[in-house]
Amino acid sequence: MVVVGKQLRLDLALQTATTVTALLEQLVGEPVDAHDRLHTSVRATVPNHLDVAEGHLLLWRSALLRGRRSALPFMRAASLIVPSRLPVDVCARLEASSDPIGRILAEEGIDFIRSPLPASGRSGPSPAGTSLTAPEHLLTRTYRLDLGDVPVMVITEWFLQTLEPFLGSLRSGRRA
């Protein structure tokens, strides 16, 4: 059973973290990498949270973030990305590397703004013909990343139950 206080501390820590990747790595004490990555090109539908026209080419990506040493799964994420609004190097790394999105953005020096989105009742952004169901999780959230005032991604994250043992160390959004 998850203690509500731990969920609240995780939620508060996520609000103050520069990237989810950095928070996870600090919390679990090891690097995390994106595994079980799926990528597919999709066309935008309207309405959407990305301010793109119907038919605009998007990248759908899902990944499972695992500890590099422990191989424990810590988070599942699904993203809908506007590649035409990102630098080519970022898009290439999204496609080819096992780096999580947060690490890529940080290493490429890309500043972003995170804006929470209301829960849609769906299990996250997913293209037709794919199925991504919400795993057993402690916390889920959906938000949009903007570069300046330009929307570039909608991300849904599920923080998995394997994080629970690490949550006791969260204090005011920081690991003790």
Image (cartoon, rainbow, N blue to C red):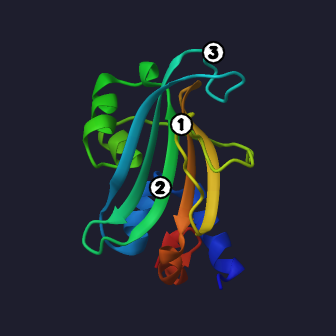
Of callouts 2 and 1, the N-terminal one: 2
Q: Nearer the viewer, mark 2 or mark 1?
A: 1
Amino acid type shown at disc 2: Val
* Residue 32: quarter of image: bottom left
The CA distance from mark 3 to mark 1 is 18 Å
Q: Which residue is mark 3?
A: 54
Residue 161 vs 17, above or below: the answer is below
Q: Quadrant of the N terminus?
A: bottom right
Q: Nearer the viewer, mark 3 or mark 1?
A: 1
Tell me where residue 93 appears, x and y as whole percent.
28, 36
Q: Are marks 3 and 1 in contact (CB under 8 Å)?
A: no
Any mark on residue 20, and which?
Answer: 2
Relative depth, front residue between 21 and 70: 70
* SS under mark 1: loop
Determine the residue positioned at 58% across, 69% down.
Answer: 136
Q: Which residue is mark 1?
A: 129
Determine the residue positioned at 67% across, 71% down.
Answer: 8
Crowd around label 3: few <14 · some 14–19 · many ≥20 (10 Å): few
Amino acid type shown at disc 3: Glu
Relative depth, front residue between 144 and 60: 60
Tell me where residue 115 appears, x and y as whole percent.
64, 41
Of callouts 3 and 2, the N-terminal one: 2
Residue 46 vs 74, above or below: the answer is above
